[in-house]
Image (tube, rainbow, N blue to C red):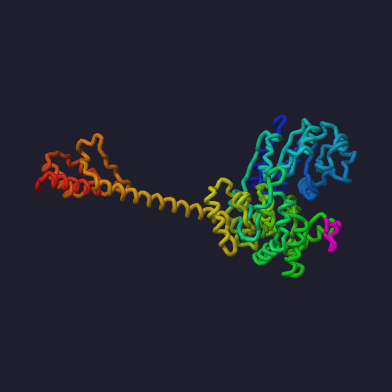
Amino acid sequence: MKLRDYQTDCLDACWQELRKDAARTLAVLPTGTGKTVLFATIADRWHKSGYGRVLILAHRYELIDQAAQKYERIAGYRPEIEMASSWVSHGMWSANHVVVGSVATMRGKRLERFPRDFFSLIIVDEAHHCTAPSYRKIFDHFQNARILGVTATPDRSDKSPLGKIFHTVAYSMEILDAIHSGWLVPIRQKFIRCNTLNLDDVGNNWKGDDLDLTELDKVMRQDDAVHRIAKPTFEKAGNRQTLVFATSVAHAKALSDVLNSYREGASEYIASYRIREDGGQDTFSEDLRAKEIALFKEGRRQFLCSCGVFLEGFDAPPTALISMARPTKSRALYAQAIGRGTRPLDGLVDSHELAADRIAAILTSQKPDCLVLDFPGNSSKHKLIYADDILFPDADAEVRERARSRMERSDKGEKVEKAIEEAHEEIRVERITRIDQLRRKLARRLQAEFFEKDVDPFGDTSGRYIVPTPPDMHHTPPSEKQVKYVLFLGRRLGRKYSFETIKAMPRKQVQGMIATLQRQMERQGVSA
């Protein structure tokens, strides 16, 4: 497979780091930019270079299957799988090959059966999980192996630092850079206010990194909330393939049922189990799950609802709308959710060398952007995460609030980048206007004080009021007639002024000086 330019740069940077002893390095690439292709290429290159066996480590079936498929396309053979009933064969023990393993499987006696020097490189998919004890036990067992972590979301909401595992960051690419380069589609966002939805009664989870999911689910599963989310999702979707992120399996089913009430067969919910009419549970078979996902990718099923199934390892480029029916405080979770919709359609961008051509291809395609629907409700207690937090993490709070207001008012949603830029410009202009108004107000006050005070700016002013120069009195010089009149009045009062000094003063200040000299002449009885 031909790598994209940034993938080549990332591979070279990772390879340079991994050549170092005891290397533990991280690569950060946005969802949809080909992380699996990248690390599968590195794994193939590593063992073919004679450096030893490679373990590709993941925590979900979808990720393990995806890694195995990508590696087979690149290397030409299926890697060994260590997961559940799949065991690494004895023929592997002497081979210089690659294993794709499950974190949940590689523990206890099943982990101990591998010699400690069995793998020379461990590649971790979705590496933001790897501070968990289950990962660290594997790292400790293969203590001399180099480690490469790959993730789209290096910031952990529970504040557990990835620096505990990784020593360096070999490569990093932001989602906005990928959009500007034409590798991902732009994000358009629409806020839909649910005034009856109150999140202030929802507490935080025990880690404090997100909303308590049990309490949140009770609020989001209320009939009113379900309908206030499902109806605009159906209306705004149009012909867009849509993923709906829910708070539980029951919530996903409720949303799917309402969507189907608008159009029969439009929606399905995906989970590890099915909820029967009597409240019981049936197993959601892998075959049925694969069938439903295939229907979605083919466009024959428009809506798929789930709790967490789609957050990792789900690749469906036709997805063009993300409905966030799960409010969250987690940047990582939100980034994973919207990342499901940022992939361009298959075969659309890789044939173009220039970013401008890729962007043009996206904008003229059947999927020119990804629409994200958020349902903020009433929440003064929690700082919820939205798309602008992911794309513009350093934006000023006032700019974000203004941009969100624009996105809420927009009928079809607003491009996040455009909303942020225009909000920033509006606030900049407003601040300049306010400063200018204050400057003019101050100038008027100072000018009034100037006329009220009986002072000689060029006389003895010790201990007396000194007239400041108003901020807007800097550019217009006095006329020659005004300068000569000041000199004339000064002579009548027995004072000598320099022509050059008066000429250099602002016109308004000279006018004020003339008025002051005239009042002094009146009081002293000096005729003009």
With respect to residue 497, does 257 lie above or below?
below
Residue positioned 60% across, 60% down in the render: 363
Instruction: Give the total of numbered labels.
Output: 0
Q: Which residues are magenta?
A: 273-284
Residue 31, relative to residue 408: is it above or below?
Answer: above
Q: Position of residue 224 (x, y in %)?
A: 69, 63
Classify residue 410 as left or right of residue 256. Answer: left
The residue positioned farthest toward the right in the image shown:
90
Q: Is residue 528 left or right of residue 309?
A: left
- Which corner quadrant of the image does residue 147 belong to? top right
Residue 297 in view of the camera? no
Is 278 inside the magenta-drawn segment? yes
Q: Quadrant of residue 151?
A: top right
Where does residue 352 sit, x and y in percent of width and height?
62, 54
The reply to whether residue 59 is visible in this rendering is yes
Indicate the position of residue 397 as horizontal and vertical percent values.
54, 49
Q: Nearer the viewer, residue 143 or 50?
A: 143
Tell me where residue 496 appears, x and y as whole percent: 14, 38
User: Residue sitting at 71 percent across and 42 percent down?
Assistant: 207
Question: Is-magenta flag for residue 424?
Answer: no
Asked where in the image residue 499 lies, by quadrant, the reply is top left
Residue 80 shown left or right of residue 470 in the figure? right
Q: Nearer the viewer, residue 367 or 207?
A: 207
